[in-house]
C-alpha cells in the first residue's frame, strides 16, 4: 500500500505502567502518593545544591539499579538511563505479555526526554577539560536516542526505536506518537514513556532564570514562588486493543488521541493568552473524537511559575470552552516536582490511575487562589470522579505543546482522517557544498571533496554569511543550530512559494531532526558553570540548551504554529523527521509540515567523533548542515497552485535491538526497513532506480549496509540494478542531517534528469535504528 492508503484505526490499550519517582520506585508508590497529596519534594542528597536558590527537588533518593547489564562504561553512571530501565522493568513485567505473544519486529520503543545524555556528556567533557581521557563509549550515551536503543536492546525490540525531545512536553509527545504507531499498523505493541535526571547543569539553568521556588511548588496559588524540579521515569506498555483482549491482558485505559501545537511566541515563556496550548487541546479532542464536555479530569502542566499558571488556565478555558469550569484540574508537579521530559509520562500514569480509581488527585500546597487561576484545582485533598475521559497536558520551552486524551470504558472510536498523498514542494539547504540543493548537487556531480583535515580527522563545515538571511537583532540569542534551522526553513518556504500568514499559520507545522542537538549552547552554558560555579550560569544561553530550541526558533521566525516536535534518532534523525512529518500530514493534522534536519560542529564534537571513529585522513568525515523539506498534503499543494517536486510513497523503520552503539553486522535491521518501505509504497525491489545510501566511511556500518543491499537487490546492485550512491563520502556525514541531505540530492537529481523513477533514501542511527524512505518524482 502507498503512504496515502488508509485503514480503520486500531484502538490503543494501556495494559501496564511502571514508574520511579521521588514517591518511590514503583507506579503504585507514585499513585498512592499523588492520591494522598503527599509532597515528596525535599532536600537533595546526591549532589551539591550550594549556590542555588533552593536545596529542594523531587529527588529519587534510594538506590534502585536496573537488573542485568546496561552496557554503560564501567566506573560511570547515568541516572536517566537507569531510571528508564527500572521503570521499564516494572511495566514490562506487569504487562502479562509472553515472549511469543508479539513478534520482536512488531514491538516498538518511543521515549521522551529533555536532558537524556547530559550526565554522560558531562562525564566526558569534564575529563576533557581536565586534560584527561574518558572512555569514548560514554559518547554513545550522549544522544537521547541511547535510551531508546538501550530499552530496545534489553527487550530485543526490532521495530521502531525512537526518541522525542520536545523539552517538558516530550513524555506526552512520545506516548502520543507511540499510540499512532499502533493505531495505523506500524506496530502491535510499544514501550513508551520518558526519563530525566537532576544534574548541576539543569538546576543551574533554572536557577539562572530565577524560576526555582525555595519551598515546594504551589501551582495556581496566589503566593506561589516558582517551580520545583524532579527526576525519574514513567513507562507504559501500549498494545493494540483487540490483541490485548485476545491475549487476556488488562486494559486499564486507552490512548484515544493526542494533539501538538507551537506557540511561536518566546523561547521560555508561554503565549500569555494560552492560544498555542489551547490548539493542542483542541487537536487532541478532534483526533480522539471526544467532545469537550465529556472531559471530567485534566492533569495539568501546573509548574507553579508566575507566567505559566495563568497562561495554562486561559488555554484550558479556550480548549474546553464552557466545560472548563466544571472539570477537575490538578498538578502532579506539586508533589514530585517537574520531571521535565519525563513529566508527561509520569503524569499520564497518574491520569490513567485517576480514571481507573475514579479519583481526582489533588493539587498539593494550595493556599489562597490566584484570581487569574480560577478553575477547580482540587486543592490539597483528592475527590471522587465520575468520568471516562481525561486530558493530560504538557507545555514546554520553545512553545512546544502536547495534549493526551486518555479514556476508560468508552465505546466510540477515533474518526478516520481524510486520505491524501504527501508531496515535497520545496527544499532549503545549508551544507559544506554551499547554499541550496543546486550547490549540493554540483559538488556531488563534480566529485568535489568538501572535507578537510582538522584535529586529526576529516571535517566538513558550513560557510555561510548569515547576515544575508537574519539581522543581528534576529540572531542575537540564537545558536548556530537555530540559525541553520531557520535559514533552511526560509529557503524551503521560498522555493515552495508558500507564504505563512494568520490564516494558515495553524495548519503549517514543524518537525526537527537532530542527532546531537545544541552542543554549542550546551558547552557555552556548562563550561563557565564548571569553572566558576552557579553564578556564572547564563540565563541568556540556557534556553538554547534544550533540543527543541531550534524548532521553537523556526516557529517564531516563520510563524508555523501547527504541530511541532523534535526527534533525536541519532544519525537517522533527519529521515525520522521526514517520516514523522509525513505521518502528521497523512492523519490530517496539518496541511504542510517543515521537516528540518540540523546539526553543528564544535571542537569538542569533532574530538568526540575522532575518538569514536578512529577516522584518519581517508575515512569517516564528520560534517554539519541545515536542511529543510516542505511536505504538504497533495490536495493543499495543488489548491494553492504549487508544483510538487516529489512524492513520499512509503517508509520503513526497523531496529537491530542489540543495544546502544551496536548494529547487526549483516544489516538485518536495515534490510527489513528497506523491504517495509518498498512494500508500503506498493513497489517491488526491481522498481527502485537508485539507493541514496548511508555509506559514509565507517567500515562496520558501511559493510552492514552493503550486505543488506546485496540481499535485497542481488549481485546486480550498483550495476544492472539500482545505482548505489554514497554522497557522504564527499560531502561528509552531517550527523542527524544525513538522511535529509540524501533526500535533497534525490529531489535535485530528478530536476537534472537523473535516476528517473522511485528511489530509496537510507539512514541509520549508528545504534541499530534504521529508516528507509521511498521517494518518487511527482506525478
Image: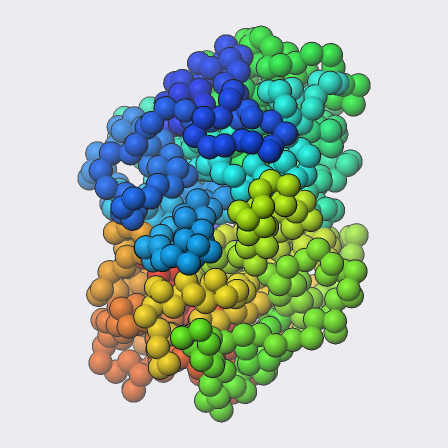
- The structure residue drawn at horizontal position 38% and vertical position 46%, both measured from the top left corner, is 148
Front-most of 72 and 527? 527
User: Is 517 positioned to the left or the right of 693 in the image?
Assistant: right
Q: Position of residue 721 (x, y in %)?
A: 31, 82
Which quadrant of the structure image shows residue 483?
bottom right
Query: Split into 4 quadrants, where in the image is the C terminus?
Result: bottom right
Q: Position of residue 159 (x, y in %)?
A: 33, 50
Q: Position of residue 297 (x, y in %)?
A: 59, 20
Q: Is residue 287 visible?
A: no
User: Is 47 positioned to the left or the right of 490 in the image?
Assistant: left
In the displayed orientation, state which residue is furthest to the bottom.
Answer: 446
User: Is 280 positioned to the left or the right of 94 in the image?
Assistant: right
Which quadrant of the structure image shows residue 368?
top right
- The structure residue drawn at horizontal position 29% and vertical position 48%, both measured from the top left corner, is 73
Instruction: Please say if 570 is above or below 109.
Output: below
Instruction: Please say if 414 is above or below 685.
Output: above
Instruction: Please say if 479 is above or below 718.
Output: above
Q: Position of residue 519 (x, y in %)?
A: 53, 57
Q: Is residue 381 visible?
A: yes
State how many labels appear.
0
Front-most of 183 and 196? 196
Which quadrant of the structure image shows residue 670?
bottom left
Query: Split into 4 quadrants, where in the image is the N terminus?
Result: bottom left
Front-most of 721 and 95? 95
- The structure residue drawn at horizontal position 48% and vertical position 88%, both measured from the top left corner, is 448
Give the colour scheme of this rendering: rainbow
- The structure residue drawn at horizontal position 50% and vertical position 32%, both measured from the top left corner, is 48
Amino acid at each position: 500500500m502507498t503512504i496515502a492508503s488508509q485503514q480503520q484505526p486500531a484502538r490503543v490499550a494501556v495494559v501496564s505502567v511502571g514508574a520511579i519517582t521521588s514517591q518511590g520506585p514503583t507506579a503504585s508508590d507514585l499513585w498512592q502518593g499523588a492520591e494522598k497529596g503527599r509532597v515528596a519534594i525535599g532536600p537533595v542528597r546526591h549532589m551539591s545544591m550550594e549556590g542555588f536558590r533552593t536545596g529542594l527537588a523531587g529527588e529519587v533518593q534510594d538506590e534502585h539499579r536496573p537488573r542485568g547489564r546496561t552496557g554503560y562504561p564501567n566506573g560511570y553512571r547515568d541516572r536517566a538511563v537507569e531510571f528508564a530501565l527500572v521503570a521499564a522493568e516494572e511495566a514490562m513485567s506487569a504487562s502479562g505479555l509472553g515472549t511469543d505473544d508479539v513478534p520482536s519486529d512488531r514491538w516498538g520503543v518511543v521515549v521522551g526526554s529533555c536532558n537524556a545524555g547530559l550526565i554522560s556528556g558531562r562525564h566526558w567533557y569534564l575529563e576533557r577539560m581536565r586534560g584527561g581521557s574518558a572512555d569514548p563509549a560514554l559518547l554513545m550515551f550522549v544522544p537521547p536516542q541511547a535510551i531508546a536503543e538501550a530499552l530496545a536492546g534489553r527487550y530485543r525490540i526490532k521495530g521502531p526505536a525512537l526518541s522525542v525531545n520536545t523539552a517538558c512536553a516530550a513524555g506526552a509527545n512520545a506516548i502520543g506518537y507511540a499510540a499512532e504507531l499502533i493505531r495505523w499498523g506500524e506496530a502491535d505493541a510499544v514501550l513508551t514513556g520518558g526519563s530525566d535526571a537532576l544534574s548541576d547543569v539543569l538546576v543551574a539553568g533554572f536557577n539562572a532564570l530565577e524560576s526555582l521556588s525555595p519551598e515546594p511548588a504551589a501551582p495556581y496559588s496566589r503566593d506561589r514562588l516558582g517551580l520545583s524540579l524532579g527526576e525519574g521515569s514513567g513507562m507504559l506498555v501500549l498494545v493494540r486493543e483487540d490483541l490485548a483482549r485476545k491475549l487476556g491482558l488488562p486494559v486499564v485505559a486507552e490512548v484515544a488521541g493526542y494533539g501538538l501545537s507551537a506557540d511561536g511566541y518566546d523561547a521560555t515563556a508561554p503565549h500569555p493568552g494560552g492560544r498555542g496550548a489551547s490548539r493542542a487541546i483542541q487537536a487532541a479532542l478532534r483526533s480522539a473524537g471526544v467532545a469537550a464536555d465529556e472531559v471530567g479530569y485534566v492533569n495539568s502542566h501546573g509548574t507553579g511559575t508566575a507566567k505559566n499558571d495563568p497562561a495554562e488556565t486561559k488555554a484550558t478555558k479556550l480548549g474546553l470552552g464552557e466545560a472548563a469550569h466544571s472539570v477537575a484540574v490538578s498538578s502532579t508537579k506539586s508533589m514530585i516536582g517537574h520531571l521535565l521530559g519525563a513529566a508527561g509520562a509520569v503524569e499520564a500514569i497518574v491520569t490513567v490511575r485517576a480514571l481507573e480509581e475514579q479519583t481526582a488527585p489533588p493539587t498539593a500546597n494550595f493556599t489562597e487562589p490566584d484570581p487569574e487561576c480560577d478553575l477547580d484545582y482540587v486543592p490539597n485533598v483528592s475527590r471522587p470522579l465520575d468520568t471516562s475521559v481525561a486530558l493530560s497536558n504538557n507545555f514546554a520551552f520553545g512553545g512546544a505543546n502536547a495534549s493526551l486524551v486518555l479514556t476508560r470504558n468508552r465505546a466510540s472510536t477515533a474518526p478516520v482522517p481524510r486520505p491524501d498523498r504527501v508531496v515535497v514542494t520545496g527544499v532549503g539547504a545549508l551544507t559544506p557544498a554551499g547554499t541550496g540543493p543546486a550547490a549540493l548537487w554540483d559538488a556531488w556531480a563534480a566529485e568535489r571533496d568538501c572535507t578537510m583535515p582538522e584535529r586529526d580527522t576529516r571535517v566538513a563545515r558550513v560557510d555561510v554569511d548569515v547576515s544575508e538571511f537574519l539581522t543581528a537583532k534576529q540572531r542575537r540569542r540564537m545558536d548556530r543550530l537555530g540559525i541553520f534551522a531557520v535559514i533552511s526553513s526560509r529557503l524551503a518556504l521560498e522555493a515552495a512559494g508558500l507564504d505563512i500568514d494568520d490564516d494558515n499559520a495553524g495548519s503549517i507545522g514543524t518537525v526537527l531532526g537532530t542527532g546531537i542537538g545544541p552542543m554549542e549552547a550546551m558547552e557555552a552554558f556548562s563550561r563557565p558553570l564548571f569553572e566558576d560555579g552557579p553564578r556564572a550560569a547564563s540565563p541568556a544561553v540556557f534556553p538554547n540548551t534544550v533540543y527543541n530550541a531550534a524548532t521553537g526558533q523556526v516557529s517564531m521566525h516563520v510563524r508555523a504554529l501547527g504541530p511541532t516536535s523534535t526527534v533525536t534518532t541519532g544519525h537517522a534523525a533527519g529521515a525520522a523527521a521526514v517520516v514523522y512529518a509525513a505521518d502528521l500530514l497523512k492523519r490530517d493534522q496539518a496541511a504542510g509540515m517543515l521537516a528540518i534536519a540540523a546539526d553543528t560542529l564544535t571542537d569538542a564534537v569533532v574530538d568526540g567523533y575522532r575518538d569514536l571513529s578512529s577516522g584518519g585522513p581517508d575515512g569517516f568525515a564528520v560534517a554539519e548542515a541545515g536542511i529543510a523539506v516542505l511536505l504538504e498534503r497533495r490536495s493543499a499543494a495543488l489548491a494553492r497552485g504549487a508544483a510538487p517536486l516529489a512524492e513520499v510513497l512509503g517508509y520503513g523503520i526497523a531496529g537491530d535491538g542489540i543495544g546502544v552503539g551496536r548494529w547487526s553486522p549483516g544489516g538485518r535491521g536495515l534490510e527489513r526497513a528497506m523491504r517495509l518501505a518498498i512494500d508500503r509504497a506498493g513497489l517491488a525491489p526491481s522498481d527502485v532506480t537508485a539507493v541514496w545510501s548511508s555509506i559514509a566511511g565507517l567500515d562496520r556500518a558501511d559493510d552492514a549496509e552493503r550486505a543488506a543491499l546485496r540481499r535485497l537487490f542481488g549481485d546486480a546492485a550498483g550495476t544492472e540494478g539500482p545505482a548505489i550512491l554514497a554522497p557522504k563520502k564527499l560531502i561528509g556525514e552531517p550527523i542527524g542531517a544525513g538522511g535529509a541531505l540524501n533526500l535533497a540530492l534525490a529531489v535535485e537529481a530528478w530536476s537534472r534528469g537523473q535516476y528517473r523513477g522511485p528511489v530509496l533514501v537510507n539512514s541509520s542511527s549508528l545504534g541499530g535504528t534504521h529508516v528507509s524512505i521511498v521517494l518518487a518524482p511527482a506525478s
